[in-house]
Amino acid sequence: MPKPASARANCWSLPELTEHVPVWMMILGFLLVLGPLVTIHELGHYLVGRWCGVKAEAFSIGFGRELAGWTDRRGTRWKLSLLPLGGYVQFAGDMNPAGTPSQEWLDLPEAERAQTFQAHPLWQRALIVLAGPLTNLLFALAIFAAFFMTVGKPQADAVVGDFTEHSAAQAAGMKQGDRILTIDGDRIGDFFDVQQKTLMFPGKRIVLVLDRSGERITLPVTIGATELTDDFGNKQRTGMLGVYFKASYMRLPPLAAGVESVRQTDAIVGTMVTGLWQIVTQQRSVKELGGPVKIAQYSGESLSQGPLAFVWFVALISINLAFINLLPIPALDGGHLAFYAAEAVRRRPVGQRSQEWAFRTGVAFVLALMLFVTFNDIASLPLFGR
Protein backbone atom coordinates (compact mmCIF):
# COMPACT_ATOMS: atom_id res chain seq x y z
CA MET A 1 0.00 0.00 0.00
CA PRO A 2 1.52 3.38 -0.98
CA LYS A 3 2.26 5.81 1.78
CA PRO A 4 -0.23 8.73 1.92
CA ALA A 5 1.43 11.95 0.84
CA SER A 6 -0.17 13.83 3.72
CA ALA A 7 0.75 11.29 6.39
CA ARG A 8 3.61 13.28 7.95
CA ALA A 9 1.62 16.51 7.93
CA ASN A 10 -1.25 14.79 9.71
CA CYS A 11 1.11 13.77 12.53
CA TRP A 12 1.87 17.38 13.38
CA SER A 13 5.12 17.39 15.35
CA LEU A 14 4.99 13.73 16.41
CA PRO A 15 7.47 11.30 14.83
CA GLU A 16 5.99 8.85 12.35
CA LEU A 17 5.87 5.59 14.28
CA THR A 18 4.74 3.34 11.44
CA GLU A 19 5.75 3.28 7.81
CA HIS A 20 2.28 3.74 6.36
CA VAL A 21 -0.18 4.94 9.00
CA PRO A 22 -0.09 8.36 10.71
CA VAL A 23 -0.19 8.56 14.48
CA TRP A 24 -3.61 10.23 14.55
CA MET A 25 -5.12 7.21 12.75
CA MET A 26 -3.50 4.81 15.21
CA ILE A 27 -5.00 6.74 18.14
CA LEU A 28 -8.41 6.98 16.48
CA GLY A 29 -8.40 3.29 15.56
CA PHE A 30 -7.34 2.31 19.09
CA LEU A 31 -10.20 4.30 20.63
CA LEU A 32 -12.73 2.97 18.11
CA VAL A 33 -11.66 -0.61 18.85
CA LEU A 34 -11.09 -0.63 22.58
CA GLY A 35 -13.84 1.81 23.62
CA PRO A 36 -16.80 -0.17 22.21
CA LEU A 37 -15.31 -3.57 23.15
CA VAL A 38 -14.69 -2.56 26.77
CA THR A 39 -18.20 -1.09 26.91
CA ILE A 40 -19.70 -4.32 25.56
CA HIS A 41 -17.65 -6.41 27.99
CA GLU A 42 -18.70 -4.37 31.02
CA LEU A 43 -22.32 -4.23 29.83
CA GLY A 44 -22.30 -8.02 29.97
CA HIS A 45 -21.34 -7.89 33.64
CA TYR A 46 -23.79 -5.07 34.34
CA LEU A 47 -26.86 -6.52 32.60
CA VAL A 48 -26.50 -10.00 34.12
CA GLY A 49 -25.84 -8.42 37.52
CA ARG A 50 -28.97 -6.33 37.18
CA TRP A 51 -30.96 -9.40 36.07
CA CYS A 52 -29.76 -11.18 39.23
CA GLY A 53 -30.80 -8.21 41.40
CA VAL A 54 -27.32 -6.88 42.20
CA LYS A 55 -26.99 -3.10 42.43
CA ALA A 56 -24.21 -1.51 40.37
CA GLU A 57 -22.65 1.50 42.08
CA ALA A 58 -20.36 2.50 39.21
CA PHE A 59 -19.88 1.71 35.51
CA SER A 60 -16.60 3.09 34.21
CA ILE A 61 -14.97 3.10 30.80
CA GLY A 62 -11.32 3.63 31.60
CA PHE A 63 -9.47 3.79 34.89
CA GLY A 64 -8.33 6.58 37.16
CA ARG A 65 -9.75 10.08 37.46
CA GLU A 66 -13.28 10.65 36.18
CA LEU A 67 -13.48 12.94 33.14
CA ALA A 68 -17.26 12.99 32.71
CA GLY A 69 -20.25 11.12 34.05
CA TRP A 70 -23.79 11.08 35.39
CA THR A 71 -25.80 9.16 37.98
CA ASP A 72 -28.97 7.34 36.87
CA ARG A 73 -32.15 6.88 38.87
CA ARG A 74 -30.94 3.51 40.16
CA GLY A 75 -27.91 5.14 41.76
CA THR A 76 -25.34 3.86 39.26
CA ARG A 77 -22.59 6.33 38.38
CA TRP A 78 -21.80 6.07 34.64
CA LYS A 79 -18.44 7.63 33.89
CA LEU A 80 -15.62 8.07 31.42
CA SER A 81 -12.22 7.91 33.10
CA LEU A 82 -8.73 9.09 32.23
CA LEU A 83 -6.86 5.90 31.22
CA PRO A 84 -8.58 4.18 28.24
CA LEU A 85 -7.06 0.75 28.88
CA GLY A 86 -10.10 -1.08 30.21
CA GLY A 87 -13.07 -0.53 32.45
CA TYR A 88 -15.04 -1.94 35.36
CA VAL A 89 -18.41 -2.34 37.00
CA GLN A 90 -18.39 -1.86 40.76
CA PHE A 91 -21.21 -3.82 42.34
CA ALA A 92 -22.62 -2.98 45.74
CA GLY A 93 -20.80 -4.80 48.54
CA ASP A 94 -17.86 -5.85 46.35
CA MET A 95 -15.38 -4.08 48.63
CA ASN A 96 -12.32 -6.36 48.76
CA PRO A 97 -10.35 -8.59 46.38
CA ALA A 98 -11.66 -11.77 47.96
CA GLY A 99 -15.26 -10.62 47.67
CA THR A 100 -15.89 -11.85 51.22
CA PRO A 101 -18.29 -10.22 53.70
CA SER A 102 -16.84 -7.39 55.78
CA GLN A 103 -18.19 -5.92 59.00
CA GLU A 104 -19.40 -2.94 56.99
CA TRP A 105 -21.40 -5.34 54.81
CA LEU A 106 -22.81 -7.18 57.83
CA ASP A 107 -23.98 -3.87 59.31
CA LEU A 108 -26.05 -2.98 56.24
CA PRO A 109 -29.86 -3.08 56.51
CA GLU A 110 -31.23 -6.38 55.22
CA ALA A 111 -32.87 -4.79 52.15
CA GLU A 112 -29.59 -3.16 51.07
CA ARG A 113 -27.56 -6.27 51.85
CA ALA A 114 -29.84 -8.32 49.57
CA GLN A 115 -28.74 -6.14 46.63
CA THR A 116 -25.02 -6.70 47.18
CA PHE A 117 -22.81 -9.03 45.19
CA GLN A 118 -21.86 -11.28 48.13
CA ALA A 119 -25.50 -11.89 49.07
CA HIS A 120 -26.20 -13.84 45.89
CA PRO A 121 -25.67 -17.58 45.38
CA LEU A 122 -22.47 -18.90 43.87
CA TRP A 123 -23.96 -19.71 40.46
CA GLN A 124 -25.23 -16.13 40.06
CA ARG A 125 -21.88 -14.61 41.03
CA ALA A 126 -20.11 -16.91 38.55
CA LEU A 127 -22.61 -16.03 35.83
CA ILE A 128 -22.09 -12.30 36.41
CA VAL A 129 -18.31 -12.72 36.09
CA LEU A 130 -18.59 -14.97 33.02
CA ALA A 131 -20.98 -12.57 31.28
CA GLY A 132 -18.23 -10.09 30.29
CA PRO A 133 -16.05 -12.45 28.23
CA LEU A 134 -19.13 -14.26 26.95
CA THR A 135 -20.56 -10.99 25.62
CA ASN A 136 -17.30 -10.33 23.74
CA LEU A 137 -17.53 -13.78 22.15
CA LEU A 138 -21.18 -13.27 21.17
CA PHE A 139 -20.30 -9.89 19.66
CA ALA A 140 -17.58 -11.49 17.52
CA LEU A 141 -19.98 -14.25 16.46
CA ALA A 142 -22.50 -11.61 15.36
CA ILE A 143 -19.86 -9.81 13.27
CA PHE A 144 -18.72 -13.02 11.57
CA ALA A 145 -22.30 -14.11 10.88
CA ALA A 146 -23.08 -10.70 9.34
CA PHE A 147 -20.01 -11.02 7.11
CA PHE A 148 -20.96 -14.48 5.91
CA MET A 149 -24.50 -13.32 5.11
CA THR A 150 -23.52 -10.11 3.30
CA VAL A 151 -19.96 -10.43 1.96
CA GLY A 152 -19.95 -14.22 1.85
CA LYS A 153 -17.76 -17.08 2.97
CA PRO A 154 -14.69 -18.01 0.92
CA GLN A 155 -15.32 -21.40 -0.69
CA ALA A 156 -12.60 -23.65 -2.02
CA ASP A 157 -12.28 -27.41 -2.21
CA ALA A 158 -8.96 -28.81 -1.01
CA VAL A 159 -7.95 -29.50 -4.63
CA VAL A 160 -4.54 -28.23 -5.69
CA GLY A 161 -4.78 -25.67 -8.47
CA ASP A 162 -1.17 -24.54 -8.63
CA PHE A 163 2.02 -24.20 -6.59
CA THR A 164 3.99 -21.28 -5.22
CA GLU A 165 7.68 -20.85 -5.91
CA HIS A 166 9.75 -23.18 -3.69
CA SER A 167 6.58 -25.08 -2.70
CA ALA A 168 7.13 -27.63 0.06
CA ALA A 169 4.19 -29.70 -1.19
CA GLN A 170 5.43 -29.79 -4.79
CA ALA A 171 8.93 -30.72 -3.63
CA ALA A 172 7.42 -33.64 -1.68
CA GLY A 173 5.66 -34.96 -4.81
CA MET A 174 2.19 -33.34 -4.80
CA LYS A 175 0.68 -32.63 -8.23
CA GLN A 176 -1.97 -30.31 -9.66
CA GLY A 177 -5.44 -31.81 -9.31
CA ASP A 178 -4.60 -33.72 -6.11
CA ARG A 179 -7.36 -33.54 -3.51
CA ILE A 180 -6.21 -33.48 0.12
CA LEU A 181 -8.34 -35.97 2.07
CA THR A 182 -6.62 -36.06 5.47
CA ILE A 183 -3.72 -34.46 7.32
CA ASP A 184 -2.26 -36.61 10.09
CA GLY A 185 -5.45 -38.66 10.04
CA ASP A 186 -7.81 -35.68 10.40
CA ARG A 187 -10.40 -35.28 7.64
CA ILE A 188 -9.99 -32.23 5.40
CA GLY A 189 -13.10 -30.64 3.94
CA ASP A 190 -11.78 -27.44 2.35
CA PHE A 191 -8.82 -25.09 2.19
CA PHE A 192 -9.80 -23.62 5.57
CA ASP A 193 -9.05 -26.98 7.21
CA VAL A 194 -5.67 -27.07 5.46
CA GLN A 195 -4.85 -23.63 6.86
CA GLN A 196 -5.71 -24.73 10.38
CA LYS A 197 -3.34 -27.69 10.10
CA THR A 198 -0.39 -25.78 8.66
CA LEU A 199 -0.43 -22.05 9.45
CA MET A 200 0.89 -22.29 13.02
CA PHE A 201 3.29 -25.19 12.43
CA PRO A 202 6.22 -24.16 10.22
CA GLY A 203 8.78 -26.96 9.95
CA LYS A 204 6.44 -29.67 11.24
CA ARG A 205 6.47 -33.09 9.54
CA ILE A 206 2.94 -34.15 8.53
CA VAL A 207 1.40 -36.99 6.54
CA LEU A 208 -1.13 -36.23 3.80
CA VAL A 209 -3.54 -38.67 2.23
CA LEU A 210 -4.39 -37.56 -1.32
CA ASP A 211 -6.91 -38.57 -3.97
CA ARG A 212 -5.11 -38.56 -7.31
CA SER A 213 -7.46 -39.54 -10.11
CA GLY A 214 -9.25 -42.04 -7.86
CA GLU A 215 -6.07 -43.46 -6.36
CA ARG A 216 -5.24 -42.91 -2.68
CA ILE A 217 -1.68 -41.77 -2.06
CA THR A 218 0.10 -41.23 1.26
CA LEU A 219 2.57 -38.36 1.12
CA PRO A 220 4.85 -37.17 3.97
CA VAL A 221 5.50 -33.39 3.80
CA THR A 222 7.52 -30.98 5.92
CA ILE A 223 5.55 -27.75 6.19
CA GLY A 224 7.48 -24.83 4.75
CA ALA A 225 8.50 -21.91 6.98
CA THR A 226 7.76 -18.50 5.49
CA GLU A 227 8.10 -15.01 6.92
CA LEU A 228 5.15 -13.02 5.63
CA THR A 229 5.29 -9.23 5.47
CA ASP A 230 2.02 -7.32 5.11
CA ASP A 231 1.45 -3.95 3.44
CA PHE A 232 2.54 -2.17 6.62
CA GLY A 233 5.83 -3.99 7.14
CA ASN A 234 4.61 -6.29 9.93
CA LYS A 235 6.36 -9.67 9.80
CA GLN A 236 5.12 -13.06 11.00
CA ARG A 237 6.63 -16.52 10.66
CA THR A 238 3.99 -18.93 9.32
CA GLY A 239 3.73 -22.44 7.94
CA MET A 240 2.78 -22.95 4.29
CA LEU A 241 2.44 -25.97 2.01
CA GLY A 242 2.89 -23.67 -0.96
CA VAL A 243 -0.28 -24.57 -2.86
CA TYR A 244 -3.06 -22.52 -4.44
CA PHE A 245 -6.75 -23.42 -4.27
CA LYS A 246 -9.43 -21.94 -6.51
CA ALA A 247 -11.67 -19.86 -4.26
CA SER A 248 -14.96 -17.99 -4.56
CA TYR A 249 -17.34 -16.26 -2.14
CA MET A 250 -20.81 -17.54 -1.34
CA ARG A 251 -23.36 -15.74 0.83
CA LEU A 252 -24.83 -17.95 3.53
CA PRO A 253 -28.37 -18.03 4.97
CA PRO A 254 -28.69 -16.95 8.63
CA LEU A 255 -28.53 -20.42 10.20
CA ALA A 256 -25.54 -21.53 8.13
CA ALA A 257 -23.84 -18.18 8.80
CA GLY A 258 -24.31 -18.70 12.52
CA VAL A 259 -22.81 -22.19 12.37
CA GLU A 260 -19.89 -20.94 10.29
CA SER A 261 -19.28 -18.03 12.69
CA VAL A 262 -18.96 -20.53 15.56
CA ARG A 263 -16.49 -22.54 13.49
CA GLN A 264 -14.51 -19.39 12.68
CA THR A 265 -14.38 -18.33 16.33
CA ASP A 266 -13.35 -21.81 17.44
CA ALA A 267 -10.52 -21.80 14.89
CA ILE A 268 -9.28 -18.38 16.06
CA VAL A 269 -9.32 -19.45 19.71
CA GLY A 270 -7.46 -22.64 18.75
CA THR A 271 -4.82 -20.55 16.98
CA MET A 272 -4.44 -18.36 20.09
CA VAL A 273 -4.01 -21.39 22.34
CA THR A 274 -1.47 -22.93 19.95
CA GLY A 275 0.46 -19.66 19.62
CA LEU A 276 0.55 -19.11 23.38
CA TRP A 277 1.73 -22.68 23.99
CA GLN A 278 4.44 -22.31 21.34
CA ILE A 279 5.68 -19.15 23.06
CA VAL A 280 5.69 -20.88 26.46
CA THR A 281 7.61 -23.85 25.01
CA GLN A 282 9.98 -21.48 23.14
CA GLN A 283 8.88 -22.63 19.69
CA ARG A 284 8.02 -19.00 18.98
CA SER A 285 9.67 -15.78 20.11
CA VAL A 286 8.12 -13.78 22.96
CA LYS A 287 8.50 -10.81 20.61
CA GLU A 288 5.29 -12.02 18.93
CA LEU A 289 3.33 -10.99 22.04
CA GLY A 290 1.61 -7.66 21.55
CA GLY A 291 0.19 -5.02 23.88
CA PRO A 292 -1.60 -1.65 23.71
CA VAL A 293 0.89 -0.06 21.30
CA LYS A 294 0.64 -2.99 18.88
CA ILE A 295 -3.16 -2.95 19.12
CA ALA A 296 -3.08 0.77 18.32
CA GLN A 297 -0.78 0.15 15.35
CA TYR A 298 -2.91 -2.66 13.93
CA SER A 299 -6.09 -0.69 14.64
CA GLY A 300 -4.80 2.22 12.56
CA GLU A 301 -3.67 -0.11 9.78
CA SER A 302 -7.06 -1.87 9.69
CA LEU A 303 -8.89 1.46 9.73
CA SER A 304 -6.83 2.65 6.75
CA GLN A 305 -7.93 -0.45 4.77
CA GLY A 306 -11.63 0.40 5.00
CA PRO A 307 -14.68 -0.44 7.11
CA LEU A 308 -14.83 -4.17 6.30
CA ALA A 309 -11.21 -4.81 7.32
CA PHE A 310 -11.67 -2.69 10.42
CA VAL A 311 -14.85 -4.43 11.59
CA TRP A 312 -13.23 -7.85 11.04
CA PHE A 313 -10.27 -6.67 13.14
CA VAL A 314 -12.68 -5.54 15.89
CA ALA A 315 -14.10 -9.08 15.98
CA LEU A 316 -10.59 -10.55 16.33
CA ILE A 317 -9.75 -8.22 19.22
CA SER A 318 -13.10 -9.00 20.86
CA ILE A 319 -12.17 -12.69 20.86
CA ASN A 320 -8.72 -11.80 22.21
CA LEU A 321 -10.28 -9.86 25.10
CA ALA A 322 -12.56 -12.77 25.94
CA PHE A 323 -9.69 -15.26 25.76
CA ILE A 324 -7.34 -13.19 27.95
CA ASN A 325 -10.03 -12.46 30.54
CA LEU A 326 -10.86 -16.15 30.85
CA LEU A 327 -7.27 -17.13 31.71
CA PRO A 328 -7.19 -18.41 35.33
CA ILE A 329 -5.14 -15.46 36.59
CA PRO A 330 -6.28 -13.73 39.80
CA ALA A 331 -7.49 -10.18 39.07
CA LEU A 332 -8.96 -11.34 35.73
CA ASP A 333 -12.43 -12.80 35.26
CA GLY A 334 -10.92 -16.26 34.85
CA GLY A 335 -9.21 -15.96 38.22
CA HIS A 336 -12.51 -15.19 39.94
CA LEU A 337 -14.14 -18.13 38.16
CA ALA A 338 -11.30 -20.40 39.34
CA PHE A 339 -11.99 -19.38 42.95
CA TYR A 340 -15.72 -19.99 42.45
CA ALA A 341 -14.94 -23.44 41.03
CA ALA A 342 -12.81 -24.19 44.10
CA GLU A 343 -15.64 -22.94 46.31
CA ALA A 344 -18.10 -25.24 44.54
CA VAL A 345 -15.81 -28.25 45.11
CA ARG A 346 -14.86 -27.39 48.70
CA ARG A 347 -18.41 -26.32 49.64
CA ARG A 348 -16.87 -23.22 51.23
CA PRO A 349 -14.91 -20.21 49.93
CA VAL A 350 -11.14 -20.20 49.72
CA GLY A 351 -9.73 -18.32 52.71
CA GLN A 352 -9.78 -14.54 52.50
CA ARG A 353 -6.03 -14.23 53.14
CA SER A 354 -5.23 -16.72 50.37
CA GLN A 355 -7.50 -14.91 47.94
CA GLU A 356 -5.99 -11.53 48.75
CA TRP A 357 -2.44 -12.81 48.23
CA ALA A 358 -3.48 -14.45 44.96
CA PHE A 359 -5.14 -11.22 43.86
CA ARG A 360 -2.02 -9.17 44.60
CA THR A 361 0.17 -11.69 42.80
CA GLY A 362 -2.19 -11.65 39.83
CA VAL A 363 -2.15 -7.85 39.66
CA ALA A 364 1.65 -7.84 39.82
CA PHE A 365 1.84 -10.45 37.04
CA VAL A 366 -0.59 -8.56 34.80
CA LEU A 367 1.25 -5.25 35.31
CA ALA A 368 4.62 -6.90 34.64
CA LEU A 369 3.25 -8.52 31.47
CA MET A 370 1.80 -5.18 30.33
CA LEU A 371 5.17 -3.48 30.80
CA PHE A 372 6.94 -6.29 28.95
CA VAL A 373 4.62 -6.34 25.92
CA THR A 374 4.59 -2.53 25.78
CA PHE A 375 8.40 -2.54 25.67
CA ASN A 376 8.21 -5.21 22.95
CA ASP A 377 5.74 -3.08 20.99
CA ILE A 378 7.82 0.09 21.19
CA ALA A 379 11.06 -1.69 20.33
CA SER A 380 9.45 -3.20 17.18
CA LEU A 381 8.40 0.15 15.72
CA PRO A 382 10.33 1.53 12.70
CA LEU A 383 11.32 4.51 14.87
CA PHE A 384 13.71 2.11 16.66
CA GLY A 385 14.94 0.37 13.54
CA ARG A 386 12.58 -2.60 13.20
Image (spheres, rainbow, N blue to C red):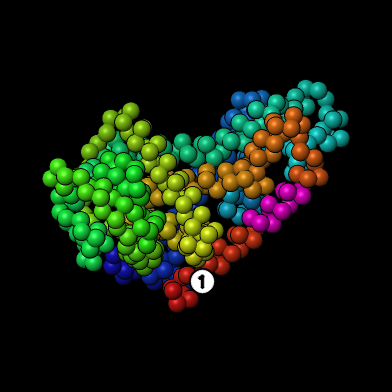
In x, y percent, where is residue 46?
60, 34
Instruction: Classify 199 as above or below 187.
Output: below
Q: Which residue: 23% across, 56% down?
A: 243
Residues in magenta, as a range = 356-366
Instruction: Classify 15 as above or below 173.
Output: below
Disc 1 element: helix
Q: Main secondary structure of the magenta part?
A: helix
Residue nearest the viewer, comparing 70 with 375: 375
Amino acid type assigned to the residue bearing label 1 in the image: Ala
Check if residue 363 falls in the magenta segment.
yes
In this rendering, would 372 be left or right of 54?
left
In x, y percent, where is residue 98?
75, 41
Residue that mark 1 sits on: 379
Residue nearest the viewer, comparing 108 with 327: 327
Tell me the quarter of the image containing the C terminus: bottom left
Residue 228 appears in the picture as rendered = no
In this rendering, would 184 be left or right of 92?
left
Residue nearest the viewer, comparing 198 with 263: 198
Q: Which residue: 47% across, 70% down?
A: 380
- Tell me if mark 1 has few (under 14), some (14-19) or many (20+) residues whose alpha carbon lies within 10 angstroms of its own: some
Q: Which residue: 14% across, 42% down?
A: 214
Q: Quadrant of residue 26?
A: bottom left
Instruction: Classify 187 as above or below 302.
Output: above
In this rendering, would 276 be left or right of 251?
right
Residue 42 appears in the picture as rendered = yes
Q: Residue furthest top?
A: 111
Check if residue 339 falls in the magenta segment.
no
Tell me the quarter of the image containing the N terminus: bottom left
Q: Which residue: 61% across, 59% down?
A: 369
In x, y percent, where is residue 355?
75, 44
